[in-house]
């Protein structure tokens, strides 16, 4: 328990974490408070002829939404099975075993936390707003949502987590195949951005929803791998 407390404390005091949090706050202020969310969504809405024409398009719905989610289930299951193999059946490489275990925990915690926040935040999707053909008023993230409005679960972006959760590959390769760490990071960011934009084109999310999902996934990855590969300062204190 004390060790895990030190890991969390180190995460909170780490300069990289401070930069990450500061960047997140700045981006949320720009997109939600300053209005870039609505500005960007308005541009996309106009490009589609003042309707969400791509909401049920075969490419955005069947391939990039449903298809990508199914592929993610397959990849995540493969990681889970590989983790079981290295952790319980082949114990010849403890470092690789820990890397797979951290990756599995990071993926599960990322998906779970994003789903949890979606369930409790009660934020509407753009397609429900009167600004974009719906009936509900636009409400900022930190504003209180009137109780007479239907309950919504659109924040943060769930589908973007299918890509962004894999930022954990950066840390996985850092501790297993060091030369591939930036490839893993780039692949996850590209996939997350593509899936996030897909949902924005369908009217499901604002950019701030995607940014929040990315922030959650990075925090989960950083914390998960810190447990199994602790920073030098924690290791030194234990000695």
Image: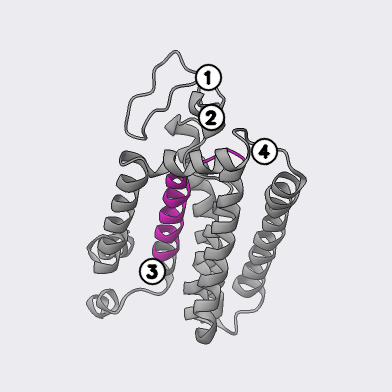
Q: Position of residue 86 (x, y in %)?
A: 62, 75
Mark in the foreground, 4 or 2 = 2
**204 in the magenta segment:** yes
How far is disc 3 from disc 2 in space, using C-alphas?
43 Å
State the residue at coordinates (51%, 36%). Answer: 154
Q: Position of residue 151 (x, y in %)?
A: 50, 23
Which residue matches tag 1?
A: 135
Q: Earlier in the sequence, mark 3 or mark 2?
A: 2
Residue 107 is left or right of residue 69, and the answer is left
Instruction: Name the mark on residue 55.
Output: 4
Mark in the foreground, 4 or 3 = 4
Q: Earlier in the sequence, mark 1 or mark 3?
A: 1
Residue 190 is left or right of residue 220, and the answer is right
Query: Which element carries disc 1, helix, strand or loop?
Result: loop
Q: Does residue 115 appear in the picture of this structure?
A: yes
Q: Is residue 124 above or below residue 179?
A: above
Q: Earlier in the sequence, mark 4 or mark 1?
A: 4
Which residue matches tag 3?
A: 226
Number of other residues with Cα within 10 Å of mark 3, as a class: few under 14, some 14 to 19, many 20 or more: some
How far is disc 4 from disc 1 in space, using C-alphas?
17 Å
Residue 119 is left or right of residue 69, and the answer is left
Label tally: 4
Number of other residues with Cα within 10 Å of mark 4, as a class: few under 14, some 14 to 19, many 20 or more: some
Q: Does residue 102 appear in the picture of this structure?
A: no
């Amino acid at each position: 328990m004390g060790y895990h407390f030190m890991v969390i404390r180190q995460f909170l005091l780490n300069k990289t974490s401070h930069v990450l949090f500061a960047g997140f706050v700045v981006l949320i202020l720009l997109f939600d408070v300053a209005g870039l969310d609505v500005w960007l969504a308005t541009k996309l809405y106009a490009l589609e002829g003042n309707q969400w024409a791509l909401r049920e398009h075969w490419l955005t719905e069947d391939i990039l939404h449903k298809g990508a989610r199914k592929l993610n289930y397959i990849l995540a299951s493969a990681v889970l099975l590989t983790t079981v193999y290295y952790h319980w059946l082949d114990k010849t490489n403890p470092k690789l075993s820990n890397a797979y275990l951290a990756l599995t925990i990071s993926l599960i915690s990322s998906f779970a936390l994003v789903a949890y926040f979606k369930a409790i935040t009660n934020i509407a999707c753009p397609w429900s707003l009167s600004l974009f053909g719906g009936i509900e008023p636009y409400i900022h993230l930190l504003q209180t949502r009137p109780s007479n409005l239907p309950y919504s679960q659109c924040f943060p972006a769930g589908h973007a987590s299918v890509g962004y959760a894999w930022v954990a590959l950066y840390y996985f390769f850092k501790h297993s195949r060091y030369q591939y760490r930036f490839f893993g990071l780039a692949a996850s960011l590209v996939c997350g951005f593509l899936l996030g934009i897909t949902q924005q084109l369908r009217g499901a999310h604002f950019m701030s929803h995607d940014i929040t999902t990315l922030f959650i996934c990075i925090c989960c990855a950083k914390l998960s791998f810190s447990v199994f590969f602790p920073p030098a300062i924690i290791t030194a204190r234990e000695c």
